[in-house]
Image (tube, rainbow, N blue to C red):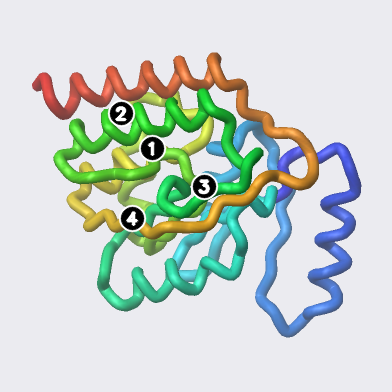
């Protein structure tokens, strides 16, 4: 998924795909806005049985993905969630208030879901397509606040009773481009979603 980049990203990807016709590759340009929209469109276009999310900013190395597949295929879990907060990070990888926000939301999710969730906003997640389709069918149950798609997936997986497993990743500083995350505005949206979900889970 290519999401409105301002450089020649799309053209470079086209060239790389053309160099490797033996690989099953798709390239789509996002029609909407935001990461959540890109994830939903990408998953709708995907033809395989296993769905993976890897952020294109390379803050998580793609070499980590086989471990996620092995955890899923080996039956360790049904929803494999990346965790950036285990290994030491590069100095500029995550700003201080983002780190605090991640810790807060991890504690909130762990309380809501009754199981430990160490990182709610790591972009790297893996699940089976048939499970995702069941999550997507009930997305509105927890409200439509999520700008990134992470909370939709975690809440949806928990509601279905999927086995969630945290898998540590090494998180690196972004080396190119600027993040589209607006810390305070998006943080308030995520908090709104947590409060809405709490009413559905804890206070029913």
Q: Are marks 3 and 2 in contact (CB under 8 Å)?
A: no
CA–CA distance between discs 2 and 1?
7 Å
Q: Which label belongs to residue 152?
A: 1
- Residue occupying image coordinates x 23% and y 45%: 116
Residue under label 2: 142
Direction left: furthest residue = 204
* N-terminal label among 3 and 4: 3
- The quarter of the rendered structure image containing the C terminus is top left
Question: Is the residue 202 above or below the residue 50 in the image?
Answer: above
Q: Residues within 10 Å of mark 3 (few under 14, many from 20)?
A: many
Helix, strand or loop status at disc 1? helix
- Residue occupying image coordinates x 52% and y 67%: 65
Q: Which label belongs to residue 123?
A: 3
Q: Nearer the viewer, mark 3 or mark 4?
A: 4
* N-terminal label among 2 and 1: 2
Q: Are marks 2 and 1 in contact (CB under 8 Å)?
A: yes
Residue 75 drawn at (x, y percent): 26, 73
Q: Nearer the viewer, mark 3 or mark 2?
A: 3
CA–CA distance between discs 3 and 4?
12 Å
Helix, strand or loop status at disc 2? helix
* N-terminal label among 2 and 4: 2
* N-terminal label among 3 and 1: 3
Residue 143 drawn at (x, y percent): 35, 24
């Amino acid at each position: 998924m290519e999401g409105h980049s301002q450089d020649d990203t799309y053209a470079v990807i086209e060239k790389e795909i053309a160099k490797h016709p033996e690989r099953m590759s798709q390239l789509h340009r996002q029609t909407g806005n935001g990461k959540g929209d890109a994830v939903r469109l990408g998953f709708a276009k995907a033809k395989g049985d296993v769905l993976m999310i890897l952020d294109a900013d390379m803050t998580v190395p793609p070499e980590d993905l086989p471990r996620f597949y092995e955890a899923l295929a080996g039956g360790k879990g049904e929803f494999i969630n990346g965790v950036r907060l285990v290994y030491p990070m590069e100095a500029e990888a995550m700003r201080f208030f983002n780190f605090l926000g991640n810790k807060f939301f991890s504690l909130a999710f762990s309380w809501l879901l009754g199981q430990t969730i160490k990182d709610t906003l790591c972009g790297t997640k893996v699940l089976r397509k048939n499970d995702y389709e069941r999550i997507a069918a009930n997305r509105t149950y927890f409200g439509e606040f999520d700008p990134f798609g992470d909370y939709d997936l975690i809440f949806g997986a928990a509601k279905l009773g999927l086995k969630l497993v945290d898998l540590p990743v090494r998180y690196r500083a972004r080396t190119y481009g600027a993040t589209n995350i607006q810390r305070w505005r998006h943080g308030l949206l995520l908090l709104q979603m947590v409060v809405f979900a709490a009413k559905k889970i804890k206070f029913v």
